[in-house]
Amino acid sequence: MTAQHKAALAKGREEGLAVRRYLEAIESSRPRRGRRRTPASITKRLAAIDAELATADPLTKLHLIQQKKDLSEELGKGAETEDLSALEKQFIKVAKSYGERKGISYGTWRTAGVSAAVLQKAGVARTRG
């Protein structure tokens, strides 16, 4: 394998990783149906679970323990929010070349959730030319 080929593979991996991270970030930040949970509401529910655990029967206790674990993880994830702007900058750097190499059209990017403004910054044209 030539050095040029190795460099092309490394570039492809780097671009793919930047695209994947950005798409995952915008997917996870999309609004979901229903009422959004705030850190305060999660903390309040955790306190209520602790109170219920003292008198719960074994099966209910099992479900409460799982709910407590899930809520604690959700609360932790809220603190770990990724810097979307940094991921967006990386995506903008690689989106055009990645899309051209993989044959990804403007419409496909849009369907995947990438905004028109980000695609414009990346230099991805509306039509293939």
Image (spheres, rainbow, N blue to C red):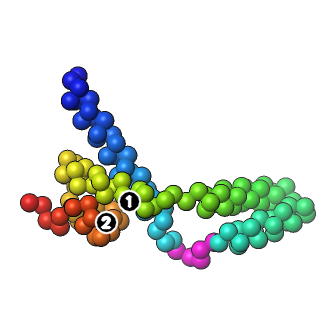
Most distant residue in the right direction: 55
Report the residue marked by disc 1.
88
Which residue is situated farthest in the left direction here? 129
Camera-nearest residue between 18 and 35: 18
The amino acid on which the numbered mark 1 sits, given as a three-letter code, is Glu
Image coords of residue 105 (percent x, y): 20, 59
| Residue 68 vs residue 97, the one in the foreground | 97
Residue placed at 21% from the left, 24% from the top?
Answer: 2
| Location of mark 2 (residue) | 118
Locate residue 35 relative to residue 112 in the image: left or right: right
What range is drawn magenta here? Answer: 33-37
Q: Does any portion of residue 23 appear in the rendered image?
A: no
Q: Is residue 48 left or right of residue 117?
A: right
Identity of the amino acid at label 2? Answer: Val
Q: Residue furthest top?
A: 1
Asked if residue 2 is among those painted magenta in the image, a careful observer would answer: no
